[in-house]
Amino acid sequence: MKTTIQEQDGQLVAILEGRLDTAVSEEVEEQLSPLHKCKDKDIVIDCTDLTYISSSGLRIFLRIVKSAKAKEKPVYIKGMAPNLRSVLSMAGFLNLFVFI
């Protein structure tokens, strides 16, 4: 699993590549900690190259959205494959994010 955070066009973009499963979830959560501290930028999670997400990954997404909502900011998800989007749907998470 590779995680990259970049500033792009006034947004904080987290690029996720590979499998977000239990084995890597603790490390990924630590790498994504800047998203929790972000106050003045929109947050985008780029899932274009994300191939799998487990319940541990869903918990990471939920923590990010809760942190952003406390600051009245949306969280955008970009490039999520239909099979992963269905996982978010089954978990009842679709309405928590803005899909671009």
Image (spheres, rainbow, N blue to C red):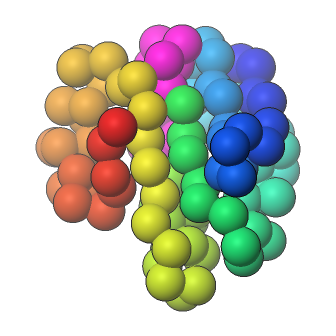
Q: Quadrant of the C terminus?
A: top left
Relative horizontal placement of residue 88, taking residue 9 as reference (left or right): left
Q: Is 50 in front, or is 98?
A: 98
Residue 76 sits above or below residue 72 on the image: above
Return the x and y of residue 18 as percentages of the image width and height: 61, 13
Q: Which residues are magenta?
A: 47-58
Return the x and y of residue 43 as percentages of the image width and height: 59, 55
Total numbered badges shown on the rendered structure: 0
Return the x and y of residue 31 as percentages of the image width and height: 83, 44
Relative horizontal placement of residue 83, taking residue 100 as reference (left or right): left
Relative horizontal placement of residue 19, taking residue 25 as reference (left or right): left
Identified at 32% across, 52% down, the residue is 98
Residue 79 sits above or below residue 69 on the image: above
Identified at 40% across, 23% down, the residue is 79
Q: Judge whether residue 9 is colored magenta.
A: no
Q: Judge whether residue 51 is colored magenta.
A: yes
Q: Quadrant of the N terminus?
A: top right
Identified at 34% across, 55% down, the residue is 97
Q: Is 21 in front, or is 46?
A: 46
Query: Which residue appears farthest toward the front when viewing the image?
Result: 9
Residue 44 appears in the picture as rendered:
yes
Identified at 79% across, 71% down, the residue is 37
